[in-house]
Image (tube, grey):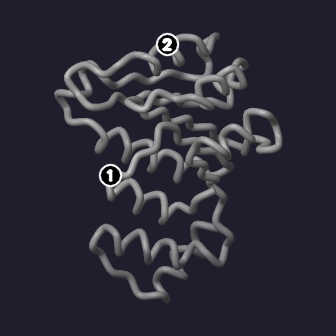
Amino acid sequence: MIGFSDLMNLLKKKSYEPVFFLHGEESYFIDVICDYIEENLLSDSEKAFNFSIFYGKDPDYRPVVDTCRKYPLMADRQLVILKEAQDMKTLIDLQGYISSPTSSTILVIAHKNGKLNMNTSLGKVLKEKAIVFESKPLYDNQVGPWIESYLSDKKRKIDPESASLTASNIVS
């Protein structure tokens, strides 16, 4: 498993693996990672033919795998994002693809509002073959420093006392 900062640094260096599995209770971090990959992996012209989004409420895994197995058009790679994977009843059937992914496809699986049991057969394949990120909620004492870090990334400053005061109003 990889932490949020480490994963974002990896992505900023344009180091992409064929499969990313993002899961956990805190959906904010999962959304940030998905949005970053979506905005930065392909150019706007490449997205027209090489970008697909699927949702877990769709009844079957086959369209996801079929899309992942295709080759990109006029680009080096394609991006496939599976959102709301926690709702996909056939999620386990993706393990065949995950164990042998297409090198020109980046598959991002966003599994929100809870973590997947990594001791299942799917979990074991994900640990072996994918970049796995678990999004954990922040503890109350972590919110203030997180606010400072967030604002710092946005080129803004806040003193620790103000961050603490803001955090106390958010947490309460």
Q: Residue 14: which numbered mark, if any?
A: 1
Work out which quarter of the rendered image holds the N terminus and state it: bottom right
**Which residue is the site of mark 2?**
66
Dividing the picture into quarters, in which one does residue 51 lie?
top left
Q: Are marks 1 and 2 in contact (CB under 8 Å)?
A: no
- Which residue is located at x 46 percent, y 21 percent? 68
Disc 2 is placed on an element classified as: helix
Single out the residue that lies furthest toward the left: 45
Q: Position of residue 56 (x, y in %)?
A: 60, 23
Mark before the other along the chain sequence, 1 or 2: 1
Say what amino acid the circle numbered 1 marks: Lys
Disc 1 is placed on an element classified as: loop
Side of 111 relative to 77 (left or right):
right
- Judge by depth and name the residue closer to the eye, 172 or 141: 141
Disc 1/disc 2 C-alpha distance (Å) = 25 Å
- Which residue is located at x 37 percent, y 71 percent? 151
Q: Position of residue 69 (x, y in %)?
A: 46, 18
Say what amino acid the circle numbered 2 marks: Asp
- Judge by depth and name the residue closer to the eye, 158 or 130: 130
- Which residue is located at x 65 percent, y 78 percent? 141
Q: Position of residue 30 (x, y in %)?
A: 53, 47
- Which residue is located at x 55 percent, y 35 percent? 109
- Judge by depth and name the residue closer to the eye, 148 or 80: 80
Q: Position of residue 2 (x, y in %)?
A: 58, 59
* Label 1 crowd (10 A; few <14 / some 14-19 / many >=20): few
Counting the numbered discs, the total is 2
Side of 36 relative to 130 (left or right):
left
